[in-house]
Image: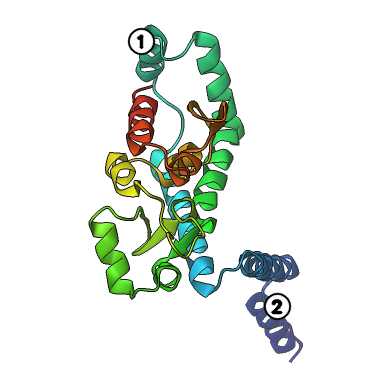
Amino acid sequence: MARAVLDTDQRDHSSAPPVPERAREDEVRDSVANLWDTVRAVGGGTDLLLDVLEEVRSSLEGRQAHGGGMTEEQAAFLVRSGTMTAQQLEDTEASVARGELSELERRTRLAAVTTSLDTREVAELLGIDASRVRHRKAKDGLYAFPVGSKLRFPSWQFTGDPGQPVLPGLTAVVRAIPDDMRASSVLGFMTTPQEDLLVDNAPVTPPEWLAGGGDPQEVVDLLESHLRS
């Protein structure tokens, strides 16, 4: 009888998750709840939350697929070609080893998602239906990037002016953005004041330039130069 009681006790303990594991589950729930609070604080809803989680999943998949550092041959080429000095290469590899670049990439990719709108939100903003939003995107009238099976439309292309809600000259700029250019890189370009775009002798961002009536070709040329560098 004592043996049977002991076996039962063992089965009960083995079937219950360890206390530390339950604590970790609580932390996960708290983290998701905090993320949801943050999404709502920036005016987002469940669609944005799901897109953020999808971007995190995609980022983790990409990290797993790309693995570790570069080969010796790749490193030698970067130095020979003048792309990096030996010291710059060493510093970069050290940053990669510390995870700094992966963390920066993750943050910038998430920033691209959290500062964008979904198709429904764009439709409401422009006063059109979702099919017309997708049509405009297909005709390069709007810029969007995929997150999973859905599209996200960066907010930098919208003016906040009901009379002209989309930046003038946007189509020319959208057509100059390569399909393989990361949304985070596009965001960085569009939100950085450019020395070649001057208003009252002060550098402005490409959206500010366009909103002020600047020539979109100036932005196109600057983007192409940026991509060549």
Q: Give the quarter of the image for residue 215.
A: top left
**Observer-nearest of 169 and 52:** 169
Q: Name the residue under label 1.
A: 81
The vertical placement of 23 against 154, above or below, is: below
Residue type, numbered disc 2: His
Left or right of residue 217, residue 57 in this image: right
Q: Which mark is residue 13?
A: 2
| Lower position in the chain sequence, tag 2 or tag 1 | 2
**Observer-nearest of 197 and 182:** 197
Which residue is depicted at the point 68% across and 82% down? 12
Left or right of residue 27, residue 91 in this image: left
Judged by depth in the image, the label closer to the viewer, 2 or 1, is 1
Q: Give the quarter of the image for residue 71.
A: top left
Q: On the rendered image, what quadrant is the C terminus found in?
A: top left
* Residue 126 at x, y percent in the picture: 40, 68
Which residue is depicted at the point 53% across and 55% down? 115
Residue type, numbered disc 1: Ser
